[in-house]
Image (spheres, rainbow, N blue to C red):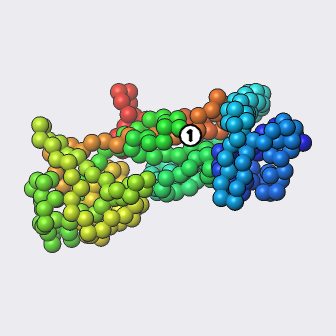
């Protein structure tokens, strides 16, 4: 038995909650992962996991052993990484997950620059607005908008998303131009709701003009949980939408959307890259975080660019 392989298998089983998921992320057979954990328990002469048909639980010995294993493996990775990266360029597979509009309009168009700098990094990109379990899904990092809710992850601010309220010309022809944001909560106008993937609740928007403040979500006939589909609903005239400026800008320029309430300000949304805490961050993850931070950075000193 390779003791470090057994420790890695044990740690991944605990993190993912099952032998099957651990085997997938380790690229081993489930039987092999089970054997490694059994050999580790035999070596230590204690049971680390209580196994049932439905779930796994750490024993008292497992509870005490797990954090020490994590620390030891992190230290081993750090030592090996410092030696390997001293002479080598970043390489290997990097798994990230990003919202679909951000992928389509910001990240993917800029990737030729990243891959030219780091040709030995293989990117696997999940494109979704869903909540991702970074550890269980074996994802290196995620990029998300809003206030981070998973406090177990490191969150690095990379930018602010500025928003605007928009409607299609076809919608405005049918319903008229609203003069005040409070009209959106009335019966004459219809909004498209955006469902927060982690809660299923419709996102509210806050508009402010001087001392006047309006907090609402409008009267919704349809609600969606994907940014691209949400924008498409607005373009189709299904209702008023509140979208980031970087998404709306090309459609405003082509006359497909009209910005409403131009003298009102909306709250910006922070954009974060989030990854698991560790004493050692892989070189490929480190260069990606630095690169995407630079991508979202201001064109000139004095604050972050609003997208």
Residue 273 in the image, given as x and y percentages of width and height: 50, 40
The image shows residue 68, relative to residue 233, as above or below, that is above
Residue displayed at 76% across by 27% down: 79
| Left-right relation of 256 to 177 | right
Q: Is residue 103 visible?
A: no
Say few, some or many: other residues with alpha carbon within 10 Å of mark 1 (under 14 / 14 to 19 / 20 or more): many
Left or right of residue 95: residue 305: left
The structure residue drawn at horizontal position 28% and vertical position 63%, both measured from the top left corner, is: 192
Q: Left of 112 or right of it: where is 191?
A: left
Q: Nearer the viewer, residue 13 or 97?
A: 13
Q: Which residue is mark 1?
A: 275
Q: Residue at x 56, y 50 (%)?
A: 133
Which quadrant of the rendered structure holds the N terminus? top right
In terms of depth relative to the viewer, which is nearer, 159 or 142?
142
Q: Quadrant of residue 162?
A: top left
In-front residue for pair 252/293: 293
Q: Secondary structure at mark 1?
A: strand
Q: Position of residue 218 (x, y in %)?
A: 21, 59
Provide residue 301's location: percent of width, then percent of height: 38, 27
Give how far across and how far down residue 3 sits, in percent: 85, 37
- Residue nearest the observer in this picture, 295 or 210: 210
Q: Where 139 falls versus 46 (above or below)?
A: below
Which residue is drawn at the image coordinates 84% and 36% (left, top)? 44
Q: Residue furthest left?
A: 179
Q: Which of the image's four quarters has the C terminus?
A: top left
Based on the displayed image, in which of its 4 quarters is residue 126 positioned? bottom right
Instruction: Tell me if I can see residue 4 in this picture.
Output: yes
Left/right placement of residue 135 relative to residue 251 reads right
């Amino acid at each position: 038995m390779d003791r470090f392989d057994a420790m890695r298998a044990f740690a991944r089983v605990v993190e993912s909650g099952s032998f099957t998921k651990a085997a997938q992320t380790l690229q081993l057979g489930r039987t092999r992962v089970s054997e490694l954990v059994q050999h580790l328990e035999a070596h230590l002469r204690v049971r680390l996991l209580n196994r049932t048909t439905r779930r796994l639980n750490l024993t008292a010995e497992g509870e005490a052993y797990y954090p020490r294993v994590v620390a030891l493996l992190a230290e081993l990775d750090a030592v090996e990484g410092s030696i390997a990266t001293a002479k080598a360029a970043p390489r290997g597979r990097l798994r990230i997950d990003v919202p679909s509009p951000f992928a389509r309009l910001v990240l993917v168009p800029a990737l030729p620059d990243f891959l030219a700098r780091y040709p030995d990094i293989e990117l696997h990109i999940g494109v979704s607005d869903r909540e991702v379990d970074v550890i269980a899904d074996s994802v290196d990092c995620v990029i998300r908008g809003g206030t981070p809710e998973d406090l177990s992850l490191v969150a690095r601010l990379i930018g602010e998303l500025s928003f605007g309220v928009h409607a299609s010309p076809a919608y405005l022809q049918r319903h008229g131009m609203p003069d005040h944001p409070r009209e959106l909560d009335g019966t004459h106008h219809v909004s498209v709701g955006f469902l927060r993937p982690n809660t299923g609740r419709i996102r509210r928007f806050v508009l402010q003009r001087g001392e006047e403040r309006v907090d609402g979500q409008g009267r919704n006939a349809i609600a969606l949980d994907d940014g691209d589909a949400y924008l498409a609903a607005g373009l189709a005239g299904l209702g008023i939408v509140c979208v980031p400026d970087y998404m709306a800008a090309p459609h405003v320029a082509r006359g497909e959307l009209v910005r409403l309430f131009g003298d009102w300000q909306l709250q910006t949304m922070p954009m974060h890259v989030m990854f698991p805490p560790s004493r050692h961050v892989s070189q490929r993850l480190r260069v990606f975080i630095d690169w995407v931070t630079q991508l979202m950075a201001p064109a000139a000193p004095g604050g972050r660019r609003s997208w």
